[in-house]
Structures are given as C-alpha cells and as structure tokens.
Amino acid sequence: EAGVAQSPRYKIIEKRQSVAFWCNPISGHATLYWYQQILGQGPKLLIQFQNNGVVDDSQLPKDRFSAERLKGVDSTLKIQPAKLEDSAVYLCASSLDTGGGNEKLFFGSGTQLSVL
Amino acid sequence: GEDVEQSLFLSVREGDSSVINCTYTDSSSTYLYWYKQEPGAGLQLLTYIFSNMDMKQDQRLTVLLNKKDKHLSLRIADTQTGDSAIYFCAETSTGGFKTIFGAGTRLFVKA
C-alpha cells in the first residue's frame, strides 16, 4: 500500500514570498490533515478535511495560509506571504475515518520550509 | 483547552527498559496514542489504548493508562539502538475530530 506522498521535500524561500505544498493521501482515506511542526515541538493541527469539506481550521492563520482539497483527494497548502516564523516542517496525514473515534493517522515525510 | 505534556529527553543503555511518560488534561479523551518519529521522517503510529483500558501489551511495548491521574506511559523492553527516536504522546477526544500531540520525548539509546 502506498503511503502519504508529499512534495517538495525541502523548500527555501525569502520572507514575503509565497510557497505551496502538495499532499496525496492514502487511497480511500476520507480525512486529511495538515500539521505544522516547529523544531523541538509536537505537530500542531492547521486544518482538517473530511472528504473535501473543512472540519477544523481554527488554528490556521487565515490571513496568510490557505488550503484546499480538490475532489476529496489531493490537497495543497499555501502560504502567502511567508514570515520568518513559518519556518517549520509541514506534515500531511490521512486517516480512514472509521467514525468510532479511533483515528489512526498515517503521516507523510513532510516538507521542510526555511524562510530567510 | 486540551494539553499534552511529556518530558523532553530520556537516555538509556541498550538492553535496558525505557519508560516514557505523558500527562494530558482532557478528561473526555477517548483514545491515547504513541507515535514514533525518526530523523527526517513523518510520525509512525506505534500503539494506542482506549480510555476504558488500563494496560495494553504489544511485543516489546507496554502502555499503561491511569485515567484518574490522566497519566499515560510507554515502556519499551530490551531497548535497542534502533529505538532511538522522538516519541509523541497524543490524544483524541470524543468524536475523534481532533488529535492533540505532546512536544515529544527524545530517546537516546547508548550502546
């Protein structure tokens, strides 16, 4: 079974530039998550989709971050304009959404973003 | 709000047991998880426990849950150098809509 695919693996940009990350979840997984992991911290949920609807985006800085999930499959996360404090690893995860509350998350390898 | 706390570092000798501890605040937590992250990789689910259980064993891994104290632990028996990684405690509340992660415990295994 193919895992969660993310690209690019690394990205270096200057502040005020824009950047986009792509994620392809495991086939059949209804729920897709974007997490931000700052060095030395645990992952923080940015946005959660169920199929192509947003379940939770309460911690997404909406003035600069946006995300979409086209046709309930692939997803892109965009930052425009980037700030120095956006330097982090952006992790995409997916889960089957069993409805029983036990959501086992499968993570991609992440995109490491450095904002200079 | 919900919070999950862990100690930051643990160092053990190869062959010893490792015990990683976690506390959480959300009394409505239904499932609690342990994830492992190796350098440059995403998180990998190791094991999980339902909140009505006290213990779960899976090969070298033993999870203990004290729901009264909101304390979760992961014991790794016969720790190997390949177990060196960051271990994250996580919890999901009723409905399973949100998974909250701790900051992670970095396990160092000395040969």
Image: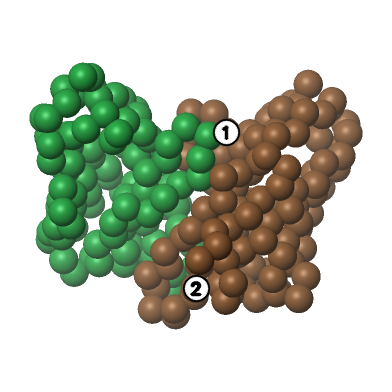
Disc 2 or 1, which lies upstream in sequence? Answer: 1
Q: Position of residue A34 (x, y in %)?
A: 62, 54
10 Å neighbourhood of mark 1: few (<14), some, or many (≥20)?
some
Give the label, 2 or 1, closer to the camera.
2
The hue in which chain A appears in the rendered picture of the protein? brown
Q: Position of residue A15 (x, y in %)?
A: 84, 27
Tell me, yes or no, if residue A112 can be seen here.
yes
Tell me, yes or no, if residue B90 can be seen here.
no
Q: Quadrant of residue B51?
A: bottom left
Q: Residue B36 or B5: which is nearer the viewer?
A: B36
Q: Tell which subunit mark 2 falls on.
A: A
Outermost residue, front direction? Answer: A1
Q: Residue at x 43, y 36 (%)?
A: B38
Q: Residue B47 or A42: which is nearer the viewer?
A: B47
| Three-letter amino acid code of the residue under disc 1 | Ile
Q: Residue A98 or B66: which is nearer the viewer?
A: A98
The hue in which chain B appears in the rendered picture of the protein? green
User: Which residue in the structure is indicated by mark 2?
Assistant: A96
State whether residue B79 is above or below residue A76: above
| Three-letter amino acid code of the residue under disc 2 | Leu
